[in-house]
Image (cartoon, coloured by chain):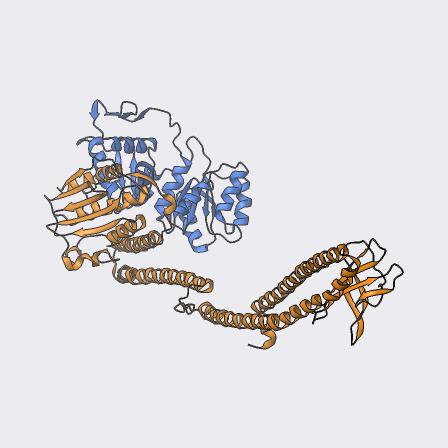
Amino acid sequence: MTTPPIENTVHGGSPLLDTGVTGRAAQPGSERMTRVLLIEDDDETAHEIVAELVDRGFHVERAATGGIGLEKARAAEHDVLVVDRMLPEIDGLVIVETLRGEQIRTPVLVLSALGGVDDRVRGLRSGGDDYLAKPFALVELIARIEALLRRPTDTRETKLRIGPLELDLIDRAAYRGGRQIELLPRECRLLEYMMRREGQMVTRAMLFEDVWNYRFVPDSNLVDVHMGRLRHKVDAPGEPPMIHSVRGAGFVLRAPG
Amino acid sequence: MRLAEFTRSTTFRWAITVAVAFALGTLVLFGFVYLRTEVYLTTRIDSLIVGELEVIATAGPTLRVDLVDSRLRGDPRRLKLAGLFGADGHRIAGNVESLPAGLKIGDPPHEVEVMRIDPDSRGLQAIRVVATRLPNGDQLIIGRSIYELDDIAAILESALLLGTLPALSIAVAAGVLLSLRAQRRIEAINQTVLRIVAGDLRERLPARGTGDPLDQLALIVNGMLDEIGGLIQQLSGVGDDIAHEVRTPLTRVRASLERGRDNAATLDELKAITDRAIGGLDKALSIVTALLRIAEIEHGRRLAGFGEVELAGVMHEVAELYDPVAEDRHIQLEVEATDIVIVRGDRDLLFEAVANLVDNAIKFTPADGKVELKLLKRADEFVIRVADTGPGISESEREVVTRRFYRSDKSRLTQGVGLGLSLVVAIAKLHGFHLTIGAGPGCTIEIAARQA
């Protein structure tokens, strides 16, 4: 499928390492490094994930078995848990269920080689906050970990404002500076989703799951086309761009400048 | 089969049990018949002798003796007994030697043993007897032999022997024969099952077409084996597909990585090659995902997600999703779905099916073409129709395109892994819907089903 050329790519350097895209993984207003516990039995996979997370400034601890992982997770010293589903000794989902049963609310990202719809539902029902099927792109993993760390703070807020961009959810009206932006209902939801995750990368899969509620679409470029429309409306010619594409990964909305 | 093994077999034990039960039942039946007969005969004898006693007792003294004598005449079987005794007990007339011990005069009929005297012989005889004292002091006794009862017992006994024993042996023989036959069939089934367990899934249990329970069981198990065989074939088909189709992109990835390692002069060149390789891997993975999904849907594991689905809504949603894409390609995407049609199904899957059809239509339609998405009602069925102004599908290809991976030559240049239609077919089949590819111009695909 031919999609319109992506207009605004992140300029300069490797886009994925751009601090503006991923953040420094530090919690806002805190000097402490974000602590991740990875429970994964496969050494090579674990090695790659740990290396990637460390590169991005996370403090990573890894457990190779379910038993050790559960013990470490119980200490509740981590900001996010990444749990493989098929582990020796204890099943990953049992770990999540056990933790939730003990009122430990650390966000959990479940990794699994089982990609069926039912597997996903089961993963989320057991208390996982997000579910990522193997194999996955590392950038997808990072985006989802960051999404878990920076959950939208106040979802009851009906007026969102990022730099010159304003979105009134009740009137379904958007403004950039004084310019009014006409939005279709879906575009409105898309913009809301992006604005609530300002400066945070969202992947195509995340958008499909959260904005469209679809799991399987014939062509993932569909998101690009819709995002292209929205960008066209938000970033008028001559205005500094706010919606950026991250090549091979997703999109990020940021205040200009 | 050895004898010991046979006698241990359940069927044999059943045969024996049934034969024994049959024998006991027969014995009880015969006993009952004997008892009833005895009661009946005794009652009859009693009423006879009581009647005769009355007749003789009311006669005058001379006539009485005549009556006794005439009663005793014409009795070839020597059943009848009668005796007239004086008050002192001496015999006046009759064939009873003396008043028997145990005789209760004036009582209802009872059983005693008397000495019977005939012109040429005498002997003891068991009889039913009734006696009375006459007005002149004489004593009159009337009796009748009960050896008839012994006769009946003897007849029954011989009937029991002649009838029951052969019947019993026939029952045992039939039981043994039947159990042997059942045993042999079970043995044959066991052997077959063992071969199936050993891995020969083409084996089937022997069925004789008689419809007996064992036959029905064999048919059910055979049906189960057919289903398992089909599933395994599908599974290995999926495996073959994956192996075959994934090999192509993987070969490309391998080649480009190899060339990149040897030839890349700058980091940027290497990065470009790596990106291509990642793209190739993603494609391979998407093929695996798509194939596994088709298999998942084909195996009907998703019936759990069924509910009521309003089709027009699904179609408008698909149109909304594809509208920008169509516009970019200068294709007019028209949706016409106003009727409210509710079907039982999995909303996500139906959405996916319609989306795949629209996706295909847009891909195959050249610029300035048109894609129509319509919901039609026909008689008692509804039709989702996706029609485009693309090159269409030739008649010879219509069957084939629904197979996994088939891509018509015209579509080689269009991206996509070629699994879209197979997926749509699988989803339609899961819902019991019917997919048809219509004649040109352009391509028209319809999914038809009855309304819920």
Number of marks: 0
Q: Quadrant of the N terminus of chain B?
A: bottom right
Q: Position of residue B316 (x, y in %)?
A: 23, 37
Relative horizontal placement of residue A22, taking residue B130 as reference (left or right): left
Q: Quadrant of residue B351?
A: top left
Q: Is residue B146 visible?
A: no
Q: Position of residue B54 (x, y in %)?
A: 74, 55
Q: Quadrant of residue A238?
A: top left
Q: Residue furthest right?
A: B88
Relative horizontal placement of residue B99, taking residue B452 as reference (left or right): right
**Nearer to the camera, B1 or B241:** B1
Q: Is residue B105 visible?
A: yes
**Nearer to the camera, B422 or B198:** B198
Chain A takes which shade in the image?
Answer: blue
**Nearer to the camera, B212 or B279:** B212
Q: Position of residue A51 (x, y in %)?
A: 41, 49
Residue displayed at 72% across by 69% down: B73
Chain B takes which shade in the image?
Answer: orange
Relative horizontal placement of residue B180, taking residue A2 as reference (left or right): right
Q: Quadrant of the C terminus of chain B?
A: top left
**Nearer to the camera, A34 or B379:** B379
Q: Position of residue B327 (x, y in %)?
A: 15, 39
